[in-house]
Image: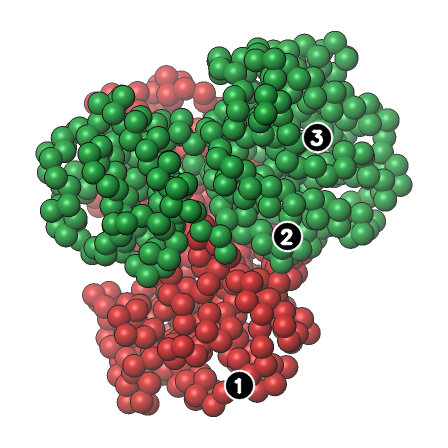
Chain colours: A red, B green
């Protein structure tokens, strides 16, 4: 097990405090575990208080010993009620709170317990901070990518005619877990759930569902209407495997194409166009283009190649992003999407996924997790990019 | 794929309306998908409006066609903004809203959009309604139990000396998925995540972590500090397998004990005491005892058997429940726990899990998902209850 080093956490806290200061906040309470993991190194049942002046304090309900093992923070104290917390708070008035994710009742209860505080949504600051990954974070994502590579390389040995999509998904999930994959992917949402086993064959690649994806899949039931299904995979079908891996909380996302026997020509062509878009967009990103421009550029490339109708989904089901930032959340800043008028900078990590849907037939495309570094980019998910025919 | 029949949804809506009426509410908005799945039959990106007078309306962002396939509701309409919703609302003033789970900002945004409404937390009413399972729901839970049984019966064939806990977890997960298990378990919480692969061997059975369980496990990292770990399983260790299965959103929970070579005597004795407690509590439940009394009764039985120190966890890590209701959430009403002063009634389904932790050594215990019916009870998770020695 790897623990976040002290310098790493110190650096993140320092960055966060500078954002608090710019926002004229006296401090912040971090209740969402994804974010206090980032700022403390632990995901125990706890919350973090970061005063603008003074050291952060992690208040732990359970388990204190594990929180102290995980986190290099100096002040880690047990608590049961907010009464025990109040003496630590000092003079604060205008403080950050995670109003975008913490439930309404919980915010009210907190307000009542701590008294007269102005709570301001602090999540935009944390999201903004988390855009840039440190070498430590990139190392964890590299390890996730290594697991992913081994999973993808196993597919040709596992894929068999008549196998159900979910059967392959389960086998890959089992293999990934034995290599350190944590099973759950994480998104910042009340209702949207992420999952690992997104395997779509032939027509299931054309099914759109509740998720913001050009291809939702059939899933297993009305209660889980996305991803791999009980459909049996056949020869000559395009099989899209979009499999996320999570290592120490850090996720990577990847898509490759497979077929048994042969891949129909339009899916091969579509794939080549997707791959071409993928690399051309990255080249232009290196030149400093804004994300919104990159989104339009990619759309133009798809159109020029004659695939505009299918690119990023069909008809009114087109999605409005080409790439999503990724880290301890599956979908975070930056986004290659309209209105994102900033360039991709050093240390940013994102999953770029040009994909196409051919109605009633299936889906094709590629996805890689990429880091901007050394005035260029590096593909973390460095599995071979050839279409694999079994 | 199974879809909720019209009579089923009609019956639930009728029950919900009668609770709304008792609470003097003009209607309710259901935004949390677990609950609108219950009341509509779909988990698409949507929310449900149930007026006290009139038919419920499901407002769907995406995917309308799938929502109409899933749900027998008559009024399923597309929407993009709340402006399109307002004309449907009629005269309402005091309405239910899921203030326990919907984030603060989202509630404020909703209030702003719909204007002058008094929002009252309606989740307690839905939770109360969901306590009683219908024959349709029990049928889905039976199917989940059947998957679970096949998974448990595979363990003796998969378990090998030196195998990592997570390796076994992954294999079982893969098998479960191929049989229809949906992979994710669901809990009503911002920070608490449920997961399937809770496999603890020897000392990992004594590790307590952030979850409200007498035995959290080691997990894989500070970001996933619960459940199966990279620890290799050895001969002569107690191996506790607590594996949840989800079918069409309905979950069941089960625990059985395994060992390679032999099981140390105190774990066998502890297991026998747990099993005895399990059945004695159920017998007394049938007689109509209140849940809080059952909790105390079980504690007394453990004490009388000389296992009071280890029962439900060690020292200050004891958990405060013996059973949790289960259904579309992993933890819901009823609870066999202090202050739950109601009896277990016909149609209630719960997971009863007397367990013991022997410090520095390991854990033992049993868990079954049980339904109260025909003035008695029935164990849904009917896998053999013998300790399995491989």
The CA span between labels 2 and 1 is 30 Å
**Circles 2, 1 touching at the beta carbon (< 8 Å):** no
The CA span between labels 2 and 3 is 20 Å
**Secondary structure at numbered mark 3:** loop
In the picture shown, does residue A277 fall above or below B120? Answer: below
Q: Is residue A45 left or right of residue A82?
A: right
**Secondary structure at numbered mark 2:** helix
Is residue B52 in view? yes
Q: Check residue A276 in the rendering and tell me which mark sits there, or answer none.
A: none
Query: Residue B204 appears in which quarter of the rendering?
Result: top right
**Circles 1, 3 touching at the beta carbon (< 8 Å):** no
Say whether disc 2 or disc 3 marks the residue closer to the N-terminus.
2
Q: In the image shown, does A272 or A70 lie closer to the viewer?
A: A272
The residue beneath circle 1 is: A263
Query: Residue A285 appears in which quarter of the rendering?
Result: bottom left
- Answer yes or no: are tags 2 and 1 on the same subunit: no
The structure residue drawn at horizontal position 79% and vertical position 39%, both measured from the top left corner, is B258
Q: In the image shown, does A66 or A161 lie closer to the viewer?
A: A161
The x and y percentages for residue B311 are 68, 20
**Secondary structure at numbered mark 1:** loop
The chain letter for the residue carrying disc 1 is A
The residue beneath circle 3 is: B366
Q: Is residue A120 left or right of residue A44?
A: left
Q: Residues within 10 Å of mark 2 (few under 14, many from 20)?
A: many
Q: In the image shown, does B233 or B177 lie closer to the viewer?
A: B177
């Amino acid at each position: 097990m790897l623990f976040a080093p002290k310098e790493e956490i110190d650096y993140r806290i320092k960055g966060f405090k500078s954002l608090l200061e710019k926002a004229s906040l006296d401090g912040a309470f971090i209740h969402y575990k994804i974010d206090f993991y980032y700022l403390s190194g632990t995901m125990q049942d706890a919350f973090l208080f970061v005063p603008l002046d003074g050291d952060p304090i992690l208040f732990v309900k359970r388990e204190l010993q594990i929180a102290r093992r995980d986190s290099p923070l100096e002040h880690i104290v047990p608590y049961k009620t907010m009464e025990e917390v109040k003496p630590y708070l000092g003079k604060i008035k205008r403080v950050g709170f995670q109003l975008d994710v913490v439930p309404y009742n919980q915010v009210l209860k907190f307000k009542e317990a701590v008294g007269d505080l102005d709570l301001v949504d602090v999540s935009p600051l944390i999201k903004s901070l988390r855009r840039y990954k440190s070498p430590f974070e990139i190392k964890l994502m590299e390890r996730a990518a290594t697991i992913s590579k081994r999973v993808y390389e196993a597919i040709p040995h596992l894929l068999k005619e008549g196998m159900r999509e979910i059967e392959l998904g389960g086998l890959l999930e089992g293999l990934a877990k034995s290599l350190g994959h944590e099973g759950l992917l994480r998104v910042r949402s009340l209702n949207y759930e992420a999952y690992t086993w997104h395997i779509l064959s032939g027509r299931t690649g054309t099914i759109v569902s509740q998720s913001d994806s050009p291809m939702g899949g059939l899933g297993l039931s009305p209660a889980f209407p996305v991803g791999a299904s009980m459909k049996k995979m056949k020869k000559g079908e395009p099989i899209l495997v979009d499999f996320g891996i999570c290592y120490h909380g850090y996720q990577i996302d990847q898509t490759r194409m497979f077929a048994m026997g042969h891949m129909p020509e339009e899916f091969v062509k579509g794939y080549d166009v997707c791959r071409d878009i993928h690399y051309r967009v990255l080249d232009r990103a290196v030149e400093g283009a804004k994300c919104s421009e990159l989104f339009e550029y990619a759309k133009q490339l798809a159109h020029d190649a004659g695939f505009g109708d299918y690119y990023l989904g069909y008809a009114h089901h087109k999605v409005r992003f080409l790439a999503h930032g990724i880290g301890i959340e599956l979908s975070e800043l930056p986004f290659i999407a309209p209105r994102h008028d900033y360039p991709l900078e050093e240390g940013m990590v994102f999953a770029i996924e040009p994909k196409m849907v051919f109605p009633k037939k299936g889906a094709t495309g590629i996805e890689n997790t990429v880091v901007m570094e050394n005035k260029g980019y590096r593909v973390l998910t460095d599995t071979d990019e050839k279409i694999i025919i079994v």
